[in-house]
Image (spheres, grey):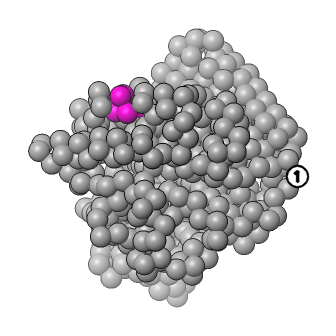
Amino acid sequence: MASAIQSLESYAEGFARLEKEAVGRELPWLRDLRERGFARFSETGFPTLRDEDWRFTNLAPITQTPFRLVRNGHAAPSWNESGFTFAHASAAFIPGAACRLVFVDGRFVPNLSSLDALPPGVTVASVAAELAKNSASIQAHLGRYLDIQRDPFCALSTAFIEDGAFVHVQKNAMAEAPIHLLFISASHDFPAVTHPRNLIVVEESAHATIVEEYVSSGGKALCNTATELVAGDNAVVSHYMIEREDAEAFNVSTLRIQQGRSANVASHSVLIGGALVRNNVHPVLSGEGGECLINGLFVGGDRQHLDNYMLVEHASPHCGSRQFYNGILSGHAHGVFHGRIIVHKDAQKTDAKQTNRNLLLSDTAQIDTKPQLEIYADDVKCTHGATIGQIEEDALFYLRSRGIDEASARRLLLMAFANECVDRMKEGPARAHVETLIREYVAGVTGSVSREAPEAAVGEAK
């Protein structure tokens, strides 16, 4: 308890320093936004197992760690001194991307970024730069959608707003090639915390593909990131969240989506790294005729904890949503899927489906799954379901009887399971990047499972 209290005090000290030094501190609306965020966080503190939305995730590894806020005085020089090089960043670059913004410890790094190939009508910049140049474009949306009352991490993110990615796609503009946002947590001689804050605005009838990717270069770090994505009427948006950080890293991310009339948004999440990861996706279909796909894959081993919390709100009639999440867990990994669909009173003719499928590759892996429906309209079509199983024994035997070794057979079966999620992604550079990452990770998992627990692969996942 004492260490948790000390942790809260360290956030208070960090906020006091931020108020004196932060970008945009001269803007009354931004000061008020930060103050409201920190006031709310101070009221609630961190979630506990008694909070229904967090009942499967023990945050003690985060709350009992004395994280320090990384600011200008530390981030700029230390990311290079800590052994991070351009090669580390370039290994994560996506071939065929329209542009890339690189952030190290939550701060924009121009010399690692490339903004030369942007299509007409598309603005991509850092939030800090946009606050200094044109704060009105930020003020119109920043903080208007994220629910700081519901989630203390969102409140904390709002309190520490300073930098992140700003993407603005004007009406009818086309940004089909991925806009790549790369966030790197560098190694420090202290536990470091950063709060990247992203704002993505895709106007009426515009198209965009956004990739948020999170990596780290070692050391204990907490990245608490939040993204507000606004999709205007008839907009088409594909958003990718890729988390593949170091084994000592913690990541809490929130994607809040606001959809207009007939907007079509796809959210793709891929979690393959980190010690403790919480992935929040919260779309609100506020315009009639909207469509939303929430698609994800989480693959964990050792003692990783991967928590996925989906909250889909149908607020208007004639909208459809689909949730598909697949989990693959080995070792002592713990996965969580908590999918919640709320159909509000006026959202007649809603069509919503939710599916969670999980493979456990060891006797010690664990999954908690909780699909949930709350329906307040009377003319809807909603379904949900979840399955937990192991690799199908007959399929494994069939492949081995054809001369395929055990590790390769497992890899083929796991890739087939993972590709259920990949197949829902549009063809292009973003999907190709995801496929490469999954293939490399699954190869490592199958090799480990084959050596350590071949007897665990029995049964069936339907």
Residue 91 in the image, given as x and y percentages of width and height: 59, 77
Give left or right: position of 241 versus 274.
right
Q: Secondary structure at mark 1?
A: loop
Quarter of the image with the N terminus is top left
Residue 326 in the image, given as x and y percentages of width and height: 50, 53
Q: Is residue 436 visible?
A: no
Q: How many marks?
A: 1
Vertical placement of 247 versus 377: above or below?
A: below
Vertical placement of 343 versus 267: above or below?
A: above
Vertical placement of 113 versus 241: above or below?
A: below
Task: Considering the whole magenta stretch, tell me its main secondary structure.
Answer: helix
Q: Residue at x 56, y 16 (%)?
A: 344
Would you say residue 400 sits in the magenta stretch? no
Name the residue at the left extreme.
2
Q: Is residue 2 visible?
A: yes
Residue 353 in the image, given as x and y percentages of width and height: 58, 34
Q: Nearer the viewer, residue 294 or 391?
A: 294
Vertical placement of 285 versus 322: above or below?
A: above
Q: In which image quadrant can residue 52 be found?
A: top left
Tag 1: amino acid: Pro
Q: Which residue is mark 1?
A: 120
Give left or right: position of 134 versus 198.
right
The stretch in magenta equals 37-41
Q: Nearer the viewer, residue 301 or 45?
A: 45
Q: Nearer the viewer, residue 118 or 211?
A: 118
Q: Residue at x 58, y 11 (%)?
A: 345
Residues packed near mark 1 inside 10 Å, few (<14), some (14 to 19) or many (20 plus): few
Q: Nearer the viewer, residue 377 or 169?
A: 169
